[in-house]
Amino acid sequence: MRLLFLSLFLFTLMLPAHAAERIELPEHTWTFSGPLGKFDQNQLQRGFQVYREVCATCHSLSLIAFRNLGDLGYNEDEIKAIAASYEIKDGPNDMGEMFTRPGRPSDHFPDPFPNRKAAEAANNGAYPPDLSLMTKARHGGADYVKALLMGYTEAPAGFDLADGQYYNRFMPGHRIAMAAPLLDGAVDYKDGSPKTLDQYTSDVSAFLTWAAEPYMIQRKETGLRVMLYIGLMTLIFYLNYRLVKRRVKGA
Ligand code: HEC
């Protein structure tokens, strides 16, 4: 018993320490938040443009195939053209050699580096993680990715950074080996949306949320339908119960 109290006591001591470690994230209102939320296809297309023109230089998106881009509102011809703009490594051919060919809709996004070592060598020894499941892998999801991309500031006085490290308010430990990848005006949007860091980071975070959970909206809709069904059945059962009770009493 005493041991139980002691462990409970120690546990309560741990709680605030853990809470203090977690960095508060600014909360953003996403179109896909809440039970009735939906992805905004225009935003996903802009986010894809940011990924393609900026992040894809270093980060793979290996779980996504070009044909999945249909969810973003691209038609078949557009998807074929997007796929064909990528070089895909294939093979071996009859001579036993690997070769490259233009991408097809069924191909997945290619890795920017031939292997992990090459990726690390190009990034000061740090590995740029695959972004397919990033919003699910980090606490805060899209809020975290947006905050991280906007979180570059001067390091406080006395804060040591090694070569190739940058200060970021939202990275755990505040040291990150990725230089700020986006600046105002870095990506040329064609739909009149603001070409600002704020807009880019929202769009690419929305895109990565879709990439990590393409069926989020269907899941929410199914959930809502199930809740409505359960509500309706409860009402029917209740009315039935009242009816039976009244009849039994009346008898
Ligand atoms: C020049 C290469 C480069 C580019 C371009 C780049 N990144 Fe990174 N990124 C990295 C590296 C390297 C890391 C690993 C950092 C570390 O572990 O310190 C990283 C890490 C990350 C992480 C994980 C942080 C964590 O919590 O561990 C996210 C999220 C991320 N990048 C998103 C992006 C997005 C979104 C873009 C495009 C807007 C982008 N990156 C562009 C190199 C890059």
Image (spheres, rainbow, N blue to C red):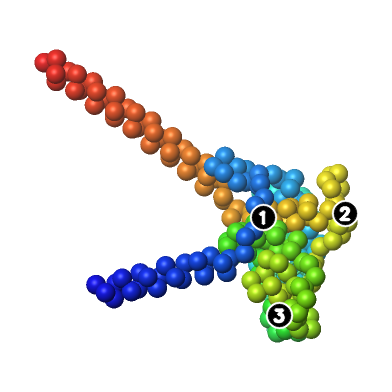
Mark toward the start of the polypeptide (1 vs 3): 1
Dot 2 crowding, Cα within 10 Å, few <14, some 14–19, many 20+ = some
**Which of the two discs, 2 and 1, sits closer to the camera?**
1
> Closest to the observer: 85 or 95?
85
Q: Secondary structure at mark 2?
A: loop
Indicate the secondary structure of the residue bearing disc 3: loop
Q: Which residue is mark 3?
A: 126
Disc 2 to disc 1, C-alpha distance: 26 Å
| Residue 23 pos. (x, y %) | 62, 64
Please, what secondary structure does the residue beneath circle 1 have? loop
Label 3 near ligand 1 (CB < 8 Å): yes
Q: How far is the residue under mark 1 from the one under mark 3?
A: 27 Å
User: x%, y% of residue 176?
Assistant: 72, 74
Name the residue tied to disc 2: 188
The structure residue drawn at horizontal position 49% and vertical position 42%, both measured from the top left corner, is 222
Residue 134 picture location, percent across and down = 63, 64
Q: Tell me: 159 left or right of 188.
A: left
Q: Are marks 1 and 3 in contact (CB under 8 Å)?
A: no
Q: For marks 1 and 3, give the one nearer the viewer.
A: 1
The answer to whether the beta carbon of the residue marked 1 is less than 8 Å from any atom of ligand 1 is no
> The residue under label 3 is which amino acid type?
Ala
Circles 3 and 2: CB atoms closer than 8 Å? no
Q: Look at mark 1 in the image and give the residue it sits on.
A: 26
Q: Is residue 219 left or right of residue 204?
A: left
- Identify whether 3 is placed above or below 76: below
